[in-house]
Amino acid sequence: MSKPKRRRNNNQTVDEAPLLSKTKPLQLRYYGDPVLRKRAEPVLEITEAEIKLAEDMLMTLYATGNGIGLAATQVGVLKRFLVVDIGSDDEENEFDPLLLFNPEILSAEGESVAEEGCLSIPDIRADVKRPEKIAVKAVTINKNEIQFEAVGLMSRVLQHEIDHLNGTLFIDRISGLKRQLLRDELKKIHQADRPL
Ligand code: ZN
């Protein structure tokens, strides 16, 4: 897997811990919230508002305790932005968090099936078939356009989060039968009044 090359600057960026301490977690949106079905709009300019969103979303991702990716749609913001941090036990191969504006899948190949869950659809997990390897184009918080390839978990998380930006949920990609079986559980999420 090729690691995206992202330039760091000496200014404070969202990768720096001190800024994060000023942020607060945002309210997550859950299955049944109509915003999760909307298509997010491209980000035309990265202003302070977008940088604040990036910081708050990264904080929100970490606050979940088990999240590895979050799309802006999931906090009710219809902008094409996502954060990913898949972590790693292996320091050599550890990724920095990815903060991507206007992410686009340029090409996809292969096929892989693995279990997914979603912060907006708590307690439900299902196998999802997706392309194994993707090439992605995006703009970083430092306004650099980058292209990179992703495989394995990174590829899967990026595809899951980009789906969110198009109003698609992972349960849309599972078989009708399996979805039928999950119907009652999905209804419960819809009706629950959830704090973060
Ligand atoms: Zn999700």
Image (cartoon, rainbow, N blue to C red):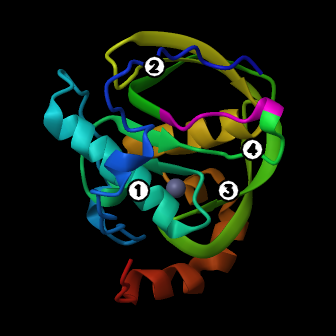
Q: Earlier in the sequence, mark 4 or mark 1?
A: 1
Quarter of image, res 101: top left
Q: Relative to 131, does residue 67 appear above or below in the rendering?
A: below
Q: Which residue is mark 3?
A: 174
The amino acid pointed to by label 3 is Ile
| Image x and y of residue 119, in percent | 52, 65
Q: Are marks 4 and 1 in contact (CB under 8 Å)?
A: no
Say which of marks 2 and 1 sits in front.
2
Q: Residue at x 68, y 33 (%)?
A: 155
**Alpha-carbon span between mark 1 and mark 3:** 30 Å
Quarter of image, res 110: top right
Q: Is residue 72 something that shows in the picture? A: no
**Alpha-carbon span between mark 4 and mark 3:** 8 Å
Where are the magenta residues, as a range?
A: 92-98
Helix, strand or loop status at disc 3: loop
Q: Crowding near pointer 2: few (<14 within 10 Å), some, many (20+)?
A: few
Say which of marks 1 and 3 sits in front.
1
Q: Which residue is mark 2?
A: 8
Question: Does residue 24 appear left or right of residue 31 in this picture?
Answer: left
Helix, strand or loop status at disc 2: loop
Q: Residue at x 47, y 14 (%)?
A: 7
Say which of marks 4 and 1 sits in front.
1
The amino acid pointed to by label 1 is Met
**Which label sits on residue 106?**
none
Say which of marks 2 and 3 sits in front.
2
Q: Which residue is mark 4?
A: 129
| Image x and y of residue 160, in percent | 57, 44
Helix, strand or loop status at disc 4: strand
Q: Are marks 4 and 3 in contact (CB under 8 Å)?
A: no
Q: Which residue is mark 1?
A: 59
Q: Earlier in the sequence, mark 1 or mark 3?
A: 1
Q: Is residue 75 something that shows in the picture? A: yes
